[in-house]
Image (tube, grey):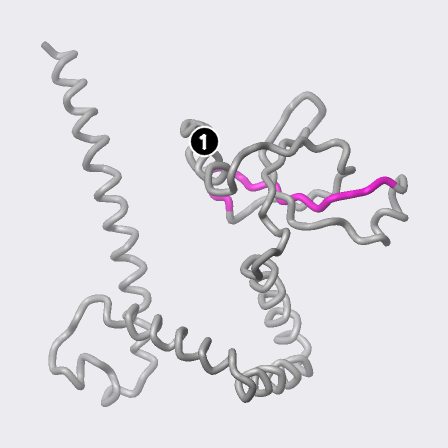
Amino acid sequence: MMSYIRRYFISGLLVWLPIWVTILVIKFLIDILDNILLLLPQRYRPDYLLGFHIPGIGLVIILIVILLTGMFAANFLGKKFVELWDSVVGRIPLVRTIHMGVKQILQTLFTPGGKSFRKVLLVEYPRAGMWTIAFQTGDSSPMMEKSSTGETMVNLYVPTTPNPTSGFLLVVPKKDVIELDMSVEQALKFVISLGVVQPI
């Protein structure tokens, strides 16, 4: 009897817990985006203008602002303005490093046809005989190859589990990695789930 109750309880938990966690995460993100509107003067806030609060209005406004900014930045005048802004920011020492670094990463990740995070690899790490999932972030520079054995090198990002946003950058010989027939999404699920969710 107790084994049936335990099995039914676990089955119910597997249904409700992911739903509950998903709702909490979405609510957390919406609350953060709604709080961004507090940066506006009170008379311009949606709650003040409408007379009541609409959950998620911050998310909608931010998405619209991003879309309109993208439309502006894609035309001739917008491109010139972005170039001018980059040149101004590029003269500020600390800000230049952060701003241009983030911009280069985003351009690498989102540019169509880019090589970053397009290949899932298997690499021996942290020692020979132990293998881990890695993502190729690009080909190594000629300078890096000259300083090594002269072999073709590749830049790899090895994510940590279960948080793939932290990890390690490795530069290894191309011959020492194995390319997997696995999508980036499948690999991320594998990493986040601690290896429980197997790639199909």
Residue name at image x 70 percent, y 33 percent: 177
Residue name at image x 26 percent, y 44 percent: 21
Viewer-proximal residue, 44 or 94? Answer: 44
Viewer-proximal residue, 132 or 180? Answer: 180
Quadrant for the N terminus in the image? top left
Q: Is residue 162 magenta?
A: yes
From the viewer's perspective, is 155 left or right of 89? right
Picture coordinates of residue 34 (x, y %)? 28, 70
Q: Which residue is mark 1?
A: 194
Disc 1 element: loop
- Crowding near the residue tagged with mark 1, few <14, some 14–19, many ≥20 C-alpha atoms within 10 Å: some
Q: Is residue 31 above or below residue 22?
A: below
Residue type marked 1? Leu
Picture coordinates of residue 150 (x, y %)? 89, 42
Q: Is residue 42 above or below residue 167?
A: below
Quadrant for the C terminus in the image? top left
